[in-house]
Image (tube, rainbow, N blue to C red):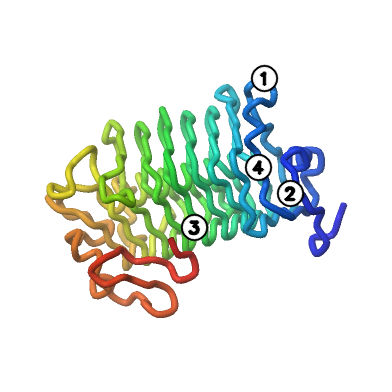
Amino acid sequence: MNDPDDPCVITTVEQLQRLDYGPEGHYALGSAIDASATKGWNDGAGFQPIRAFAGTFDGRGNVISGLYINRPGDNNVGLFADTLEGSKVRDARLAPATVTGGSYVGMLVGEAQGAIVRSHVEGRVEGGSHVGGLAGVVLPNGSVTGASARGQIVGTEALVGGLVGRSRGQIDSSYSLAAVTGRSDVGGLVGSSGGNVYRSYSLQDSADGEPMLISTRELRVGGLIGQLTEGGTVQESYTVSFSGSTPLTDFVGHPLVSAWSGYEEGVSDSYFGGNQRQDSPMGERRAVKDMKLAATYQGWDFAAVWSIAEGDGYPDLVSNPR
């Protein structure tokens, strides 16, 4: 086994695929990787997800482009099928990626028990349940820090989120700009969370100002989190989302959290933008225009942690800017 301070350097998609034969090793990308050839691999099934990854993977900010996985009959689907406790994936970038699986599906990881740090994904994910842009599931020992997701996240069943489908771990300083579709327990950031969410947000409006959709049966749909379960917390986070195809001038939006199990005290210093929507004990509702003002976010640090284009944009993370 190689040393984490002297990782095996990967420069081709074929070498990337061979990580499946050494999942306890330590690896780093030496360059950007064009993975578009994976669309023709394995009779159309594409890249074989790396299973039981227990080592370290440092993308060094290099982009893996064109990753293709089409395995609708398989669970635990992503670049990494599952990462184990003690593993670390950092500075990984996928853009664009196209990933299809059964359940536990994400562009980067299907099921995460390790740490995911400063990793960003963009593309399209499709699956049944437990579907997220970055990861399908984050387990109690798993964590996501300084990450983001963009694109289209589609789940035909429950537990679908822009960043993570279901989380029981920790999410910090992360965001999602993805359009999310699911049946129930659907969130702009996380479909269902029993873990901790700190300093994170989701926005479901596109760059050109037209609303992106969270299209579901309206069962537990939250702008940030669909359902907050026992032990889950949300601190210093926000969301602005759009309901259906409602025009911006008649904006309705979703609450911060749609459903919870009597744990209102788990949410603090968090806000959601909405007009024509009843208040919720889970987070504080503000008019959309006020979500672009620093004064709305009482107690937030708009020097070291957050930045804002006053009156013109929503808060951005200093450590993880859009």
| Amino acid type shown at disc 2 | Ala
Q: In terms of sequence position, does the residue under pointer 3 or pointer 2 come before the other? A: 2
Q: Which residue occupies 43% across, 38% down?
A: 153
Say which quarter of the image contains residue 119.
Answer: bottom right
**From the viewer's perspective, is residue 218 above or below residue 206?**
above
Foreground mark, 3 or 4? 4
The mark found on residue 43 in the picture is: 1
Query: Residue extending furthest top?
Result: 43
Element type where label 1 sits in the image: helix
Q: Position of residue 79 (x, y in %)?
A: 63, 40
Frontmost of labels 1 and 2 is 1
Question: Quarter of the image containing the C terminus?
Answer: bottom left
Q: Are marks 3 and 4 in contact (CB under 8 Å)?
A: no
Label 3, label 1: how far apart the Cα atoms are: 36 Å
Give the amino acid at mark 4. Answer: Asp
Q: Earlier in the sequence, mark 3 or mark 4?
A: 4
Mark with earlier residue (3, 1): 1
**Gap between marks 4 and 1 measured at Cα:** 19 Å
Left or right, 237 with reference to 169: left
Q: Which residue is mark 3?
A: 171
> Which dot, 2 or 4, sits closer to the camera?
4
Residues under labels 1 and 2: Cα distance? 28 Å
Q: Residue furthest right?
A: 1
Q: Are marks 4 and 1 in contact (CB under 8 Å)?
A: no
Q: What percent of the width, then of the height, locates residue 270?
A: 31, 63
Examine the image and state in which quarter residue 181 appears.
Answer: top left
| Residue picked out by circle 2 | 54
Residue, disc 4:
34
